[in-house]
Amino acid sequence: MMRVGQLVSTVNEMLERLETLFTSQRRFVADVSHELRTPLTAMPRHLEILRRGAARDPQALDASLAAMEREVNRLVRLASDLLLLAQVEAGVTLRHEPVALDELVLEVVRDLARWRTASSWCRMSPSRSRRSATAIGLSRRC
């Protein structure tokens, strides 16, 4: 009788670990989907801005192209990270390299600053943000 109880306990622990792993996997897939969706959503907006006349304004053109380049770079980094993860799961031995933390932190701070700047017009009053959006030819709602 004692062995049956141990077997039941072992099976229950195994099922709990499987449930935890499945939950982690679902969370990972949701996170990756979000990370992919963000740049893929932003790039068509920048293209629309260019189509609506920003291409004739050198400053607006540079800003849109720079934003699209950042989004493409983000997608490239995400794809590289996913490939690295797949290699780790396949048992590939990774090489360890020093990381320039100052450059990494600076990149994160710059990304956050760009995000704050890009989203700041959404915090304006509704009538002002509509006028701002209309001025650049968009009908974006915050």
Image (spheres, grey):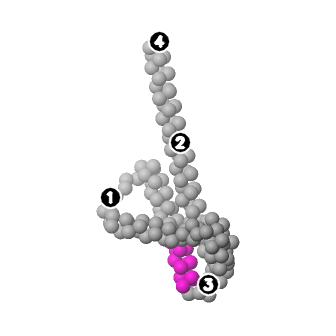
Viewer-closest of 115 and 97: 115
Tell me the number on the disc at residue 1. 4
Q: Position of residue 65 (x, y in %)?
A: 55, 78
Q: Earlier in the sequence, mark 1 or mark 3?
A: 3
Q: Magenta residues?
A: 59-70
**Residue 20 drawn above or below residue 134:** above
Residue under pointer 1: 96
Tell me the number on the disc at residue 55. 3
Residue under pointer 2: 23
Question: Is there a contact, CB below 8 Å, between mark 4 and mark 2?
Answer: no
Viewer-closest of 79 and 66: 66
Q: Earlier in the sequence, mark 4 or mark 3?
A: 4
Q: Amino acid at mark 3?
A: Ala
Q: Secondary structure at mark 1?
A: loop
Distance from label 1 to label 4 (Cα)?
Answer: 51 Å
Q: Is residue 49 rendered to the left or right of residue 59? A: right
Q: Amino acid at mark 1?
A: His
| Residue mark closest to the camera, 4 vs 2 | 2
